[in-house]
Amino acid sequence: MANYSTVIFPGRVVTPLVDPNKGSITNRLDCAGEQFKNHTINLLQGTAVAGTAAGVTYAAYKNEKVANGVIKGLKAVRNVMNKNKYTGKVAGWITKALSSMPKAGKIGVIAAAIALPVLSYIDHKDSYKAGQIDQKYTDKAAVQSQLDNIVTLDRIS
């Protein structure tokens, strides 16, 4: 789902260093540094979300009181969902699908179901921001190139 290999294999971070559209080496290094910062922040956010989901599931597995508390909260959410005719159908389907699982299993499935869209959003945000950063430094290099051409023409005249 998420592109967490960027820190391990930093393709987007290294690419600006060899991209001829980025202009000067200073501009390339600035772009690579900003890309690294963006990917690191998003990696930490994704790790926090996934870790929280896993932590809640593990706590429910190890401690019956935690499991009962989480299940009680989930039942309250289900009751709210049942009041709406559209979400009531979904709540009924979820209840039926999870009825045969142990408490920790139910909590794990629900935690994963909540975590996956959040991880997808973090990945989308990472990719979108990476594109913005790339465009920023490509534009900066193009402007610098045009300024260099103007200065060169003035020196010839």
Image (tube, helix red, strand yellow):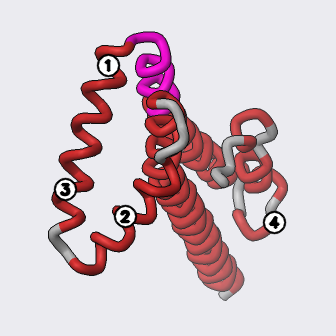
Our reading of the magenta stretch's main secondary structure is helix
Q: Position of residue 139 (x, y in %)?
A: 58, 74
Using a 10 Å C-alpha cutoff, classify the residue at mark 4 as few (fewer than 14 neighbours), some (14 to 19) or many (20 or more).
few
Residue at image x 67%, y 80%? 149
Label 4 close to label 1 by CB (< 8 Å)? no
Residue found at x 75% / y 70%: 21
Three-letter amino acid code at the position of disc 1: Val
User: How far apart are labels 4 and 1 at the CA level?
Assistant: 56 Å
Q: Nearer the viewer, mark 2 or mark 1?
A: 2
Tell which circle, 4 or 3, labels the residue nearer the N-terminal end: 4
Give me the C-alpha separation between circle 2 and circle 3: 10 Å
* Image position of 59 with respect to 80: above or below: above
Res. 79 mark: 3
Q: Which label belongs to residue 66?
A: 1
Q: CA distance from mark 2 to mark 4?
A: 57 Å
Who comes first in sequence, dot 2 or dot 4?
Answer: 4
What is the secondary structure assignment of the residue under circle 3? helix
* Kind of residue indicated by mark 2: Gly
Contact flag, marks 1 and 3 (Cβ < 8 Å): no
Residue 104 seen in the figure: yes
Which residue in the structure is indicated by mark 2?
A: 92
Q: Nearer the viewer, residue 21 or 57?
A: 57
Which of labels 4 and 1 is toward the front?
Answer: 1
Residue at 70% x, 36% y is 7
Quick one: label 2, few (<14), some, or many (20+) residues within 10 Å? few
Residue denoted by label 4: 20
Dot 4 or dot 1, earlier in sequence: 4
Q: Position of residue 41 (x, y in %)?
A: 49, 39
Tally of numbered tags: 4
Q: Residue at x 68, y 50 (%)?
A: 3
Sequence-first disc among 1 and 3: 1
Q: Please provide the residue range marked out in magenta.
A: 53-63
